[in-house]
Image (cartoon, coloured by chain):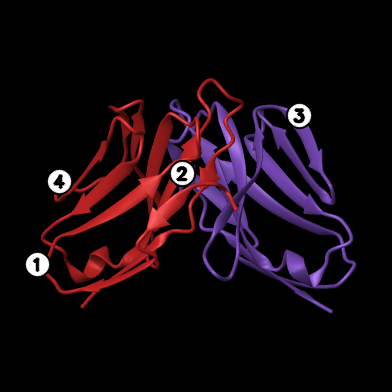
Amino acid sequence: KNEVEQSPQNLTAQEGEFITINCSYSVGISALHWLQQHPGGGIVSLFMLSSGKKKHGRLIATINIQEKHSSLHITASHPRDSAVYICAAREGSQGNLIFGKGTKLSVKP
Amino acid sequence: DSGVTQTPKHLITATGQRVTLRCSPRSGDLSVYWYQQSLDQGLQFLIQYYNGEERAKGNILERFSAQQFPDLHSELNLSSLELGDSALYFCASSVPLSTGELFFGEGSRLTVL
């Protein structure tokens, strides 16, 4: 069993839809990261959470430490949101991350 | 642009060879992290350096080594290359004592033939 699991693996949405990607982890963590990987391969850090909720533009990330679960929400999705979204649990040192396998999101116009 | 520079962007080599990947962190970032992304294993943490010293080690093979130089750039050396080493290698850097945000380079794509 992977220590960090994401669902769904693939997601197709119509432009404007509200999207939720889920992440569950089984390890004790000090923080959880959400990353976006573009089709060209580059990775962008979206959020780092240790509790509660964070919002940046149309993106919202939440974490429930007791339930070991985090969600990434995208409101009013747009084709430019098409990417792979990866959650990663941080144990100890800042960059020592355990990665989920990613959710491939495709937003159709 | 994250401010993290990786070279080369693409590299094709043969089994048994040795390559060096280079990473220049963002100005002022003391920590450098290396990650490997392969088709079968996904993303994995390899190693972290902080101000020239090794800080944490992940799933890094003995054939691989890294170092961080006084100017804070880092190099990842991969030797006795095998087909399975073909992957994207990412470097990231972070601000010391920060909230934890990581800034990733564009990656170096290594193909071993």
Disc 2 is placed on an element classified as: strand
| Residue in the foreground of this view, choosing between B35 and A8 | B35
Instruction: Please tell me which of labels 1 and 4 falls first in the chain.
Output: 1
Task: Please tell me in which quadrant of the rendered image residue B111 appears.
Answer: bottom left
Tell me which chain the residue with mark 2 is part of. B
Instruction: Select label 2 or label 4 by which is in front.
Output: 2
Label placed on residue B92: 2
Label placed on residue A63: none
Disc 1 is placed on an element classified as: loop
- Amino acid type, label 2: Ala
Residue A33: percent from the left, percent from the top? 60, 41
Disc 4 is placed on an element classified as: loop
Residue marked by disc 4: B62
Q: Which chain is red?
A: B
| Residue in the foreground of this view, choosing between A87 and B50 | B50
**Contact check, label 2 and label 1, Cβ < 8 Å:** no
Tell me which chain the residue with mark 3 is part of. A
Task: Please tell me in which quadrant of the rendered image residue B110 appears.
Answer: bottom left
Residue marked by disc 1: B16
- Amino acid type, label 1: Gly
Rendered position, A4 above or below B79: above
Residue under the image location 35 percent in, 40 percent down? B73
Q: Which chain is purple?
A: A
